[in-house]
Image (cartoon, helix red, strand yellow):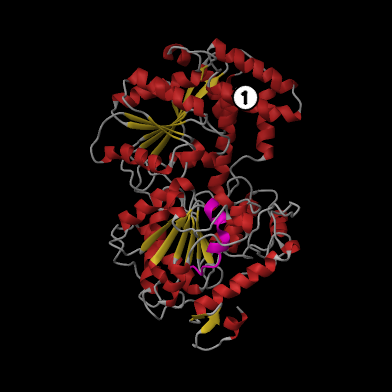
């Protein structure tokens, strides 16, 4: 090895009796291998997950500087020179909306200005994928020119559920081979890229397991830019030693909020990748707490928001002042440089998008559901701190359905749940209109029970379900089958989805209705679900339906009423600033205390209950519609 490193000319070097041509790519590979072997002999320098004690059985990951405790390193700003005109490439066959053209211009300006990366945080449904594909297609055209300074491949990392969507989007929007050759690093295709002797994952051995010798040759020949890699966050973490050696021209991190926890292997693997330009995509830059955004931005442009500890102290308590300041740091220009992030709402830039209306459908709980609620409430009020969250989840579940231990005819099963009764009424009206609907249900058992009920009640031959167990190819087949209504309207149809598994990345504009049979206390999650329908490509008004189960003696103090107030308050805050929208301890504590309250009265009239609900939420009185629903202003 030393003989190769000392050889500075073009003469071949002798290794194990064989003559080998010395090239820059091979020298770089040998440097990396020597460094790796040195690290393997120094176990005290292996970096484990923060907070873990390193041991021989822990994961072996790439070493990086960390900015959390203190600012260890900042990405440099070095201007880049375009080798072609800075205009939308001809290979993009899909006409872009004005806001998408502006996004393309912004990404290109950021690339030219030398920014290490950018965050596209446009609201769900504004076409972030197409915006990104347009920029990457331009970058591909730029790299065809020998004058381009960086001519590496492109890496796209996405949740498993979105891989086929990325392939279809590229096929749809880019002419011919304008995007180059796809290298799939997931599923069965991953095996074809492994070395013959590969065993386990790279985090177990610390040894590269992918056979990328062909890519070394592509770099030597000046054609590495013709390739693009598509993989998942998990695969990136598992094969970081191979992928970390590749100098990518660009790296896309779709649904980048998936790596908001800086301690995960996937988040640290993203940090360790060698990419000239990084693009993070998310419609929810802050899912739970402000520190989420720090991690995301530090993966895109290290050091841009200072150290993690300083950031956490500065934005520990979200209020209008701190959140407005944080918004400006990310989404406003810095001197002559473009902003690090782009954040637009549909109401601002997609005004031609059809209207989205929200309806509450309140129903009084039948006795069996109210009794189950009472029992859960007593246990919540008398339980200790450790049991409180568990009982709150149980009350949330009971508010959907009190449960059923044996086989029950569909009509009797529905009769036990106020929410289910409201949903069935809504579905009858949707069927009469010959339209399509997405029904979001969290629990697996209820997803399939509900599908059986729908088949029985509405005579549908097939109702598909998408949840975390749905394989990627099957998932895309279901989406394509549902979307066929856009080409040949087949009338009434229902698709059931899990909000976590199917709340992002899918385009389901064949539907015009969304029903939330079960709800979380995070408006961001709910909006992600709504935006599967209310997005670019939708041509008809969209209706979002929220069934509410109200206890006859608790009225607006029922779980569903209290949850609606919490969601309404958080949405209002989010409209004013970049606000954490989910799962905070204060929200859960406040909701638990309110639900545990034993205050009761005679609240058997829905109109009176809803009047109290709107007063509490600061909403002007709303009169019920003919079907008993209330449209939110």
Q: Is the residue 377 above or below the residue 51 in the image?
A: above
Q: Is residue 616 visible?
A: yes
Q: Is residue 297 visible?
A: no
Q: In which quadrant is the N terminus drawn?
A: bottom right
Taking the image as shown, residue 591 lies to the left or right of residue 236, namely right
Viewer-nearest residue: 69 or 445: 445
Q: Quadrant of residue 521?
A: top right
Residue at the spot 49% in from the left edge and 39% down from the top edge: 501
Q: Position of residue 84 (x, y in %)?
A: 36, 76
Viewer-nearest residue: 602 or 392: 392
Q: Is residue 508 covered in magenta?
A: no
Q: Which residue is mark 1?
A: 394
Q: Is the residue 282 above or below the residue 581 in the image?
A: below
Q: Can you name the residue that lies furthest to the front here? A: 17
Q: Is the residue 474 above or below the residue 616 in the image?
A: below
Q: Secondary structure at mark 1?
A: helix
Q: Is the residue 588 above or below the residue 293 in the image?
A: above
Viewer-nearest residue: 148 or 286: 148
Question: What range is drawn magenta here?
Answer: 234-248
Q: Position of residue 518 (x, y in %)?
A: 51, 29
Residue at the spot 55% in from the left edge and 31% down from the top edge: 564
Q: Is residue 236 covered in magenta?
A: yes
Taking the image as shown, residue 65 lies to the left or right of residue 440, namely right
Q: Position of residue 356 (x, y in %)?
A: 40, 39
For the stretch drawn in magenta, what is the main secondary structure? helix
- Mark 1 Cα-neighbour bin, 10 Å: few <14, some 14–19, many ≥20: some
Residue at the spot 60% in from the left edge and 85% down from the top edge: 6
């Amino acid at each position: 090895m030393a003989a190769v490193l000392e050889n500075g000319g073009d003469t071949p070097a002798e290794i194990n009796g064989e003559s080998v041509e010395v090239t820059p790519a091979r020298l770089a590979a040998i440097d990396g291998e020597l460094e790796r072997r040195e690290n393997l002999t120094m176990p005290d320098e292996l970096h484990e997950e923060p907070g873990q004690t390193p041991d021989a059985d822990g994961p072996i990951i790439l070493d990086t500087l960390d900015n959390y405790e203190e600012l260890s390193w900042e990405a440099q700003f070095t201007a880049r020179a375009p080798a072609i005109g800075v205009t939308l490439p001809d290979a993009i066959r899909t006409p872009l909306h004005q806001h998408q053209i502006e996004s393309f211009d912004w990404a290109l300006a950021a690339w030219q200005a030398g920014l290490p990366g950018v965050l596209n945080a446009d609201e769900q449904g504004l076409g972030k994928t197409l915006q990104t594909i347009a920029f990457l297609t331009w970058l591909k055209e730029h790299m065809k020119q020998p004058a381009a300074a960086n001519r590496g491949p492109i890496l796209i990392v996405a949740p498993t559920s979105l891989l086929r969507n990325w392939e279809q989007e590229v096929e749809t929007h880019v002419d011919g081979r304008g995007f180059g050759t796809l290298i799939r690093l997931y599923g069965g295709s991953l095996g074809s890229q492994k070395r013959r002797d590969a065993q386990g994952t790279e985090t177990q051995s610390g040894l590269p397991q992918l056979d990328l010798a062909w890519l070394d040759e592509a770099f030597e020949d000046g054609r590495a830019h013709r390739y693009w890699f598509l993989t998942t966050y998990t695969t990136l973490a598992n094969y970081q030693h191979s992928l970390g050696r590749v100098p990518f021209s660009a790296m896309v991190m779709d649904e980048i909020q998936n790596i908001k926890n800086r301690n995960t292997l996937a988040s640290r693997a993203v940090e360790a990748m060698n990419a000239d330009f990084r693009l993070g995509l998310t419609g929810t830059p802050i899912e739970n707490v402000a520190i989420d955004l720090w991690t995301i931005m530090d993966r895109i442009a290290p050091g841009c928001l200072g150290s993690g500890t300083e950031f956490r102290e500065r934005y520990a308590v979200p209020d209008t002042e701190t959140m407005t300041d944080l918004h400006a740091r990310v989404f406003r220009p810095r001197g002559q440089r473009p902003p690090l992030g782009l954040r637009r709402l549909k109401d601002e830039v997609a005004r031609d998008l059809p209207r989205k209306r929200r309806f509450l459908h309140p129903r009084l709980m039948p006795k069996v559901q109210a009794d189950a609620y009472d029992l859960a409430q007593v246990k919540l009020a008398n339980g200790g701190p450790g049991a409180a969250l568990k009982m709150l989840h149980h009350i949330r579940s009971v508010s959907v359905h009190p449960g059923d231990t044996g086989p029950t005819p569909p009509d009797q099963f529905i009769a036990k749940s106020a929410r289910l009764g409201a949903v069935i009424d809504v579905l009858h009206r949707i069927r009469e209109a010959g339209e399509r609907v997405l029904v979001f249900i969290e629990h697996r058992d209820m997803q399939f029970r509900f599908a059986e009920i729908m088949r029985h009640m509405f005579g549908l031959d097939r109702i598909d379900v998408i949840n975390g167990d749905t394989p990627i190819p099957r998932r895309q087949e279901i989406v394509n089958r549902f979307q066929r209504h856009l080409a040949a309207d087949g009338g009434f149809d229902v698709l059931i989805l899990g909000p976590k598994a199917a709340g992002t990345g899918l385009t389901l504009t064949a539907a015009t209705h969304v029903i939330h049979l079960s709800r979380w206390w995070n408006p961001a999650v709910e909006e992600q679900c709504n935006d599967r329908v209310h997005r670019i490509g939708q041509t008809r008004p969209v209706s979002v339906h929220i069934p509410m189960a109200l206890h006859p003696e608790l009225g607006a103090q029922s779980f569903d009423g209290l949850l609606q107030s919490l969601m309404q308050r958080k949405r209002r805050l989010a409209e004013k600033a970049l606000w954490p929208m989910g799962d905070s301890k204060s929200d859960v504590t406040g909701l638990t205390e309110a639900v545990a309250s034993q205050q009761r009265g005679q609240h058997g009239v829905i109109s009176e209950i809803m009047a109290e609900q709107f007063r509490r939420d600061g909403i002007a009185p709303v009169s019920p519609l003919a079907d008993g629903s209330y449209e939110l202003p």
